[in-house]
Amino acid sequence: MTNIALLGCGRIGQVHAKAIARTPGASLVAVADAMAPAATRLAAQYGAEMRDIDAIEAAADVDAVVICTPTDTHADLIERFSRAGKAIFCEKPVDLSEARVRACLEVVRQTGARLMIGFNRRFDPHFVALKAAIDAGRIGEVEQITITSRDPGLPPASYIKVSGGIFRDMTIHDFDMARYLLGEEVVSVYASAAALADPSIRDLGDYDTATVVLTTASGRQATILNSRRASYGYDQRIEVHGSLGMVQAENQRAADIEVATAAGYLKPPLLDFFMTRYTAAYEAELGAFLAALADGTAMSPSGEDGLAALKLAEAALESLRTGAAAPVR
C-alpha cells in the first residue's frame, strides 16, 4: 500500500482524491490546503487527516505526495519533497520559467527523487489505443498529426492573469501529446493566435484562439487547434495520418448512440469538461505512478517531458513575436 498526501484541495485536487480512492494499492492519508474549509471537506469525504505542509514533509506514514497547488508553488514543493525522500506526482507545469524548471530538475537529479508530471491525456483509453495502433505499424510511418483541443468556455479573468498564457497553460497538454505521438523531437514551431472569443483577453496579454504547427527534423508535422470557447462542448480529438493509413480518436459522449427521425440525425452532447472527459485517464495515470514506484521503472511523463513541453510553448511565443517559425532551443 502506498500512502499518499494530497497538496491542494481545489478542483484538480478533488479529481486526484477521487482517483486515489478508486485505485487499488493507494491510500489517501493526509490533505493540505491554504484554504482550511476545502481541506476539511476533502478530508472528511475520504477519511484522511488534515495536516500542514511541515507535518506531511516529516511524516513517516507518507510515501508520496500529489501536488495540485497553484503553479507558482510547484517547483518549490518538488524540491522540498525531493529532499524529504518522498515520491512526487505534480500537476503540469513544473513552473512557467524554463530556468526555474531546470533548477528544480537538478535538485530532483541530485536527490534521486521519483518525479512524474501530470500530462493525463497520455493515459486516456482512446488515446492509448490510438498510440498502440501507431506503435503496431498499422498506419505505417507517421506523417501528419492534427490535435483539436477546445474548451467549452472561457476561464475567469483572474485565472487568465496568472495562468502563464494559453501556450503554457492549455496548449502545453497538446505539445506533450504531439511529442508523444510524433516519435521524433520537434525542431521548429510556427504559431498564430488571436482573441476572438473575448477581445478583452488581449488586454490581459493573452489569447483564446490559437493554431500551432510543429515540425520535426525529418519533416513530420503536427497541427494543434485550440480555442477556449466551443459552444458544443469539450472538443478533444486526435487524427494521425501515416504512410499506410490513418487512425483517429473521436470526441466522447455520455452515451454512444444516434437517434434518427424525420427531423434528422441526433447524438447526445459531448462530455462537458475535463473532470468528466478524462476521469479514466486520471485513474490510469495514478496507476502508472504507483506501478513505477513498485517496480522501479522510470517515471513517464518525467520532469524532462515537462521541460520539453514548456520549451515548445516558449518557441510558440517567439513565433508570435517574430511572425516566423521559431527554432526549439
Image (spheres, grey):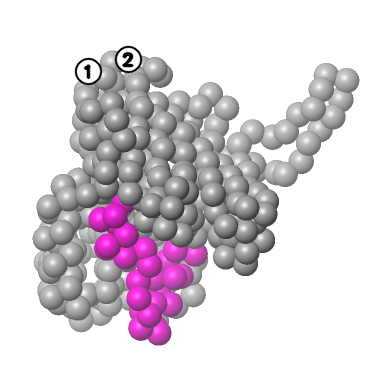
Q: Position of residue 234 (x, y in %)?
A: 52, 36
Task: Describe residue 71's horizontal placement relative to residue 48 as left or right.
Answer: left
Q: CA distance from mark 1 to mark 2?
A: 8 Å
Specify the segment rendered in magenta: 283-309
Examine the rendering and report whether any part of residue 252 can be seen.
no
Q: Quadrant of residue 263?
A: top right
Label 2 neighbour load within 10 Å: few <14, some 14-19, many 20+: few
Q: Position of residue 177 (x, y in %)?
A: 44, 52
| Residue under numbered circle 1 | 203
Q: Is residue 284 magenta?
A: yes
Residue farthest to the right, as pictured = 262
| Residue under numbered circle 2 | 199
Q: Position of residue 34 (x, y in %)?
A: 18, 50
Examine the rendering and report whether any part of residue 295 can be seen.
yes
Q: Position of residue 79 (x, y in %)?
A: 14, 65
Identify the residue shown where x is 35% and y is 35%.
Answer: 190
Q: For the residue marked with disc 1, what is the amino acid?
A: Asp
Residue 232 in the image: above or below residue 285: above
Q: Which numbered disc covers residue 36?
A: none
Q: For the residue marked with disc 2, what is the amino acid?
A: Pro
Identify the residue shown where x is 69% and y is 35%.
Answer: 268
| Residue nearest the viewer, comparing 318 with 251 | 318
| Residue nearest the viewer, comparing 298 with 146 | 146
Q: Is residue 129 magenta?
A: no
Residue farthest to the front, as pictured = 218
Helix, strand or loop at mark 1: helix
